[in-house]
Amino acid sequence: DIQMTQSPSSLSASVGDRVTITCRASQSISSYLNWYQQKPGKAPKLLIYAASSLQSGVPSRFSGSGSGTDFTLTISSLQPEDFATYFCQQSDSPPITFGQGTRLEIK
Amino acid sequence: EVQLVESGGVVVQPGGSLRLSCAASGFTFDDYTMHWVRQAPGKGLEWVSLISWDGDSTYYADSVKGRFTISRDNSKNSLYLQMNSLRTEDTALYYCAKDIGSSGWLYYFDYWGQGTLVTVSS
C-alpha cells in the first residue's frame, strides 16, 4: 500500500499569511495527488486534483504543486474561512490512501 | 444538484451486522464509480471500498476485506455497504462519495454525502 505522510500535523497562522502544507508518498505516484478541505461537522471538499488542478469553484488563493513523491498545498493569503483540516489523498491505485491531515488553526 | 444521502447507521454490538445505504440524485448514477470512506471520531479519513459504475468491479481496504460487501442498484440510484462481523474499530462516520470519473474511475471524489454514524459497542 502507498503510505501518505503530511506535515505539519497542525499549524497556527494568521489571516493574510501564506501557508504551505506538505505531503509525501511512500513511492512515486506521478501526479495522482489530490487535496481536500474539511471543516468541523462537514464532509470533505475537493480543492485540488492531479496535484495542481484547481477544482471548479475553489478560490485561486489555493494552489498545488509537485510530482513523484513530494507535493505541496499552498494558500497564498489565508482567509477566515480557510481554517480547517486539510488532507492529501493518492489516486494512483487502490487501496486509496489519505494523509493523516493537517489542522490549520487561527494564531 | 448532486445529492448523496446515507442512512442505516446505528449502535450495534461487536460481531453484529449492518447495512448502510446511500441514495443518489442529481447525476446519472450508473455512469459513475462509487466509494465508501469512513472517519473514526476525531481521526482522519480511511477509504473503505469502491464499486464500478456497472457493479462488475469492487475493491476493498484490507481492514474490511472479507467482512464488508459493497453493492449497488442502478435502477434505484442506490449504493449499499453490507457490514458483517463488526469490530469496535469499525466505529466511524461512513461517507458515500462519488468518483469524479465517468464510465471509469479516477479514484478521487467530487461529491460526498453527510455521513451516517456506525457505533460498534457492547
Image (spheres, rainbow, N blue to C red):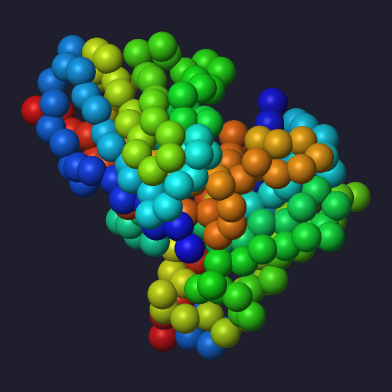
- Residue B71: x percent and y percent? 76, 63
**Quarter the C terminus of chain B occupies:** bottom left
Above or below residue A68? Residue B1 is: above
Q: Which quadrant of the structure image shows residue A35?
A: top left
- Report whether residue B11 is seen: no
Position of A1 relative to B66 (above/below): above
- Name the residue at 17% across, 17% down: A17
Q: Residue at x 45, y 57 (%)?
A: A2
Residue B50 position in % (x across, y down) = 66, 57
Q: Residue at x 50, y 35 (%)?
A: A31
- Farthest residue, direction left: A107
Q: Position of residue B116 (x, y in %)?
A: 54, 56
The x and y percentages for residue A63 are 38, 20
Out of B119 and A106, give the one closest to the viewer. A106
Foreground: B79 or A65? A65
Q: Is residue A54 visible?
A: yes
For residue B3, side relative to residue A23 (left or right): right
Q: Quadrant of residue B16?
A: bottom right
Which residue ends up furthest to the right in the rendered image?
B75
Q: How many marks do you count on the picture?
A: 0
Would you place residue B94 above or below residue A18 in this image?
Answer: below
- Seen in the image, is A35 located left or right of residue A8? right
- Tell whether A17 sits left or right of A42: left
Give me the residue at 60% from left, 75% from top: B65
Looking at the figure, which quarter contains the N terminus of chain B?
top right
Residue A1 to residue A7: above or below? below
